[in-house]
Image: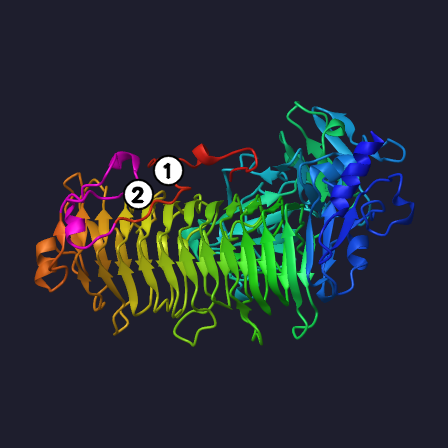
Amino acid sequence: MMKNFVCLLFVLCFTSTLSKQLFVVPFATLFSQHSDGSLLHPYSSIQQALDSIQHEHSTVYLYPTYYFSNPIQLNSKHSHTRLTTMSIENATFYERLTADRTIHHLQRLQTAVISGGVPITGWTSLGNNTYSVVVPSSYFINQLFINNQRIPRTRVPTNFSDYLYYVAPLNDSRMARNGFEYSPGQFNYPYLTDAMVVVYHSYTESHHYIDRLITENNTVLFSNPSHYDIGTNQMQSKRRFHIENLCDALVANTFCFNNQTKTVYLMTNGLYDPNKVQIIAPIHDIVVTIASNDSNNPVKDITIDNLIIQHGSWSITRTQVAEGPSAEFLTNAALYVDNATEINIINIEVSHTGSYGVRIKEGTLNINLMDSLVNDTGAGGVWIGERYRQIPILSNYSKVISNEISYGGNVFPSGVGVLVYRAIGAVVSDNIIHHHRYNGISIGDQSGYIPPWTHSILIQRNYVYTIGQHILCDQGGIYIIGVQPGTVVHGNVVKNVFSYATYMWGIYLDNGASNIIVSNNVIYNSGWAALFQHQGVNNTIVNNVFARASLIQPAHEEDPFPDGDVRIQNAEGLTSWTYTRNIVYDTFRGINHTAVNLNPNVIAPFNNNVYYNPYDTQLLFGAERTSFGEWQSSGQDNNSVIADPLFVGDVNQCDFFAVRSNSPAAKLGFVNITKLPTWTPGCDMDDDLYSHQQFYHW
């Protein structure tokens, strides 16, 4: 046996001298009494290993288990460092050299997990599948994960798909952000100190602690205000709210936390004993940081690969405004990158977070997130760039490529799958982005026609689906705002975009979105138009398929009707877009349905397009909602046709909408769009078909 170890040592030690090799093993070995990070004398913690590095090329290998620690910090002295999981051979080697053979309590994994949480143990049974545990006074528990699955906080209504409805906003304009008038009985609970009220607006939701109830007039007042006046967008909000963290509302697989007594209460479904499963509660907002305090001395050349980063927490103070577009009030993320350059994050998992999974801030250059999974996030997946502030160094040339970014918005539904604010040259390519409750991809931060901070963004070959999920309003599968010269949206597939009540588009060009190319995309199954431009000029819409748009009939009596297939809202006095070689495949059954919806005086040339509805629905065109013949008489779409585009395969299964060689679209110059390898066929709009136990429904 010892001969085998000597041979293994020889192989492991015969490595390149260009990189110092450090090993981290969180248990005692025969040789670890004098740790120096070498193979025979490993470090006992990640930070201990990093603290030993002084501006040298180093690789830190982690034994594959959980690491519960304070946030791991890589700064400029760690430039040229790689952080990764050690090989199975190395892990086996250390296990066989264990000093006391008592590592049975340590969970051996395939990949090392850096956790921002702590194990919660010592549960006491209270009967009725309910348990409690008292945690240290420094802990504030607002998330639990049991056997790698999220357990939600209690919620009223206990059916998570239902809502409470407040009676009216407050008449006092000075208090319009601080509360509302509620219905009698909605707050009849003995202990509300730790309760959180979540109020739905349009494209945001606000999170509030309760200051007091005025029972004489059924008014609830919050200790922290919303950003916007409560009740401003009644059509979108429907005066919805819910209450979280009420211990009176425990149902199976939920928990609550009493901060005064530091007690966590958990109700199981009766199928497990909390003392026999792994239960982790996040306590740190940031799990891993790659950042320098000096923008003139950034962190350089860091590689993180083959690791898992989990259990980032979230926190809201009792006076903090906890509302904003894209949940931008959250300042931290599980993996946080700032003032850094040439950072490669490859083949990792970031999951079970309270905020965003990955945040790439200003002062960054060539940050690459590739071949990774960002999953089960409290807000969004990946956030690049800063908003509002004057920034001396933007985020430049970051790349988000070939990742799965999924199941977001579990705490803050306004989070975005991939959010790019002020940045130049970012690439968002070949990702699968799905099950987010707001935009799938959102680019830009400035409304209107001011000089851009964001431009030259490439959004290509992404598969974006199951977006919105009927929670918020005013959203898109891909959303772009502001002037963005050089920005290209190419080769993406977007499907299943549905809001709660109104305003839900496949691709959404918002205030001032200009100088953008939208080409070779397949957009289908959208609640409203497949393509919507609110305001913008000089955009090019070429060689796209827009299919099965405006599928949602008004869900509520006061909801407006969907707006057709493609639409421009505002006339700008300049060319809004040039629209050519596109296919509109419309499946609306009824009358008065608009294929091209333009407001009066919009300037937008259309030509060489194919329109079709297989159910003999007359399609209407333009500001006057005229017939196709009248639309052509106005000078539009003179070379276009209403004809079956002759798709290959079963159009009723949404088989990617490629056309045959004899298609009228092909004769007009349409070129078939490259099918994404990750795309799956089927026209189904039922979100439940895509759910798994990692995700809970609202």
Q: 55 or 550, which lies in front?
A: 55
| Count of numbered badges drawn on the protein | 2
Q: Residue 685 got which mark?
A: 1
Range of residues picked out in magenta: 643-671
Q: Are marks 2 and 1 in contact (CB under 8 Å)?
A: yes
Screen quadrant of the N terminus: top right
Residue 216, image x, y percentages: 61, 50
Given the image, on which type of amino acid does mark 1 rest? Met
Quick check: 276 above or below 349? above
Please name the residue shown 34% across and 69% down the image. 515
Please name the residue shown 88% across and 44% down the image. 32
**Label 2 residue SS:** loop
420 on left or right of 246: left
Q: Which of marks 2 and 1 is nearer the N terminus?
A: 2
Given the image, on which type of amino acid does mark 2 rest? Leu
Q: 486 or 579, which lies in front?
A: 486
**Label 1 residue SS:** loop
Residue 604, image x, y percentages: 22, 66
Q: Name the residue under label 2.
A: 551
